[in-house]
Image: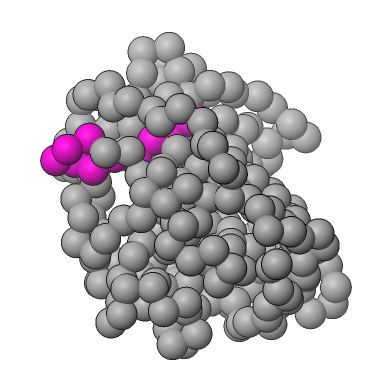
């Protein structure tokens, strides 16, 4: 059974190229300060899963997470478990005033979905600028396809922890112990491949549906592939839905699939 958990929010990337995580731009859009990344909020909701199921969840767990309001650096939060059994739990992340910041349905299914197969998409050139995230360019990416992006899971990565006090991570996620990739990094790959295919600033991570297929050891070389599945406008914001798969760069082992929803252009831009 999953247990309630509490912690202090940690914004690992206050100087991110996505300036919604910095105070100045976030305040321009009416927020109190820079937003804690949505993938970090997601890691908090999945923390009880790692505690409950350990490496089994990293190898086969699933999560459906929706971010509904901002969380700020240094805020105390509670992961409130609503329902729980041996195979699944539902939870919400509560801010100090009781506001729900995000919700999740997390599980360890006995049988997971079919494992995605790598297509071999062309890898993006790191030195070439991404096109602006206009509707026209997003439609082109949706029609013509996206470029793959390479990553490396290392002890120096900005997402190597989702807590300022790394000793509070589950042991198998601590760099000096297990060193397996955590949820903020795994889901972060879906953000970074989207940002590498279309330049967005600022933009907001809204939701993911993810399925793990394997735990990622320290210093693993990775490649992500993506397709855009939908584009739509809601309340003046421009949204994108994308499907991302994360593979071992050398042997094509699939580590995770992620369905991402994001606002790539905020109202007023």
Q: Which is the main secondary structure of the residues drawn in magenta? A: strand
Query: Quick check: 167 above or below 155?
Result: below
Q: Position of residue 150 (x, y in %)?
A: 23, 43
Image quadrant assignment for residue 215: bottom left
> Is residue 116 rendered to the left or right of residue 20?
left
Q: Residue at x 83, y 67 (%)?
A: 99
Image quadrant assignment for residue 122: top left
Does the image show residue 69?
no
Does the image show residue 263?
yes
Q: Quadrant of the C terminus?
A: top right
Q: Which span is picked out in magenta?
A: 242-252
Q: Residue at x 54, y 63 (%)?
A: 53
Q: Position of residue 124 (x, y in %)?
A: 22, 34
Query: Quick check: 104 above or below 31?
Result: above
Q: Quadrant of the N terminus?
A: bottom right
80 part of magenta stretch: no
């Amino acid at each position: 059974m999953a247990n309630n958990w509490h912690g202090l929010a940690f914004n690992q990337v206050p100087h991110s190229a996505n300036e919604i995580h910095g105070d100045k731009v976030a305040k321009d859009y009416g927020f109190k300060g820079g937003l804690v990344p949505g993938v970090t909020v997601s890691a908090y909701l999945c923390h009880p899963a790692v505690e409950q199921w350990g490496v089994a969840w990293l190898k086969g767990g699933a999560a459906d997470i929706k971010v509904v309001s901002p969380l700020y650096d240094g805020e105390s939060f509670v992961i409130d478990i609503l329902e729980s059994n041996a195979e699944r739990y539902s939870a919400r992340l509560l801010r100090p005033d009781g506001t729900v910041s995000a919700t999740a349905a997390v599980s360890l299914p006995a049988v997971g979905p079919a494992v995605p197969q790598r297509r071999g998409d062309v890898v993006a050139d790191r030195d070439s600028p991404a096109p602006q995230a206009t509707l026209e360019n997003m439609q082109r990416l949706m029609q013509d396809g996206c470029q793959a992006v390479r990553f490396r899971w290392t002890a120096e990565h900005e997402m190597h922890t989702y807590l300022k006090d790394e000793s509070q991570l589950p042991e198998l996620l601590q760099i000096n112990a297990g060193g397996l990739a955590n949820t903020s990094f795994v889901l972060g790959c879906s953000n970074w491949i989207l940002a590498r295919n279309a330049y967005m600033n600022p933009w907001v991570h809204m939701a993911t549906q993810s399925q793990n297929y394997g735990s990622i050891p320290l210093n693993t070389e990775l490649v992500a592939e993506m397709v855009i599945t939908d584009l739509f406008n809601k309340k003046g914001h421009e949204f994108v839905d994308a499907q991302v798969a994360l593979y071992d760069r050398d042997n094509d082992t699939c580590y995770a699939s992620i369905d991402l929803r994001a606002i790539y252009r905020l109202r007023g831009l």
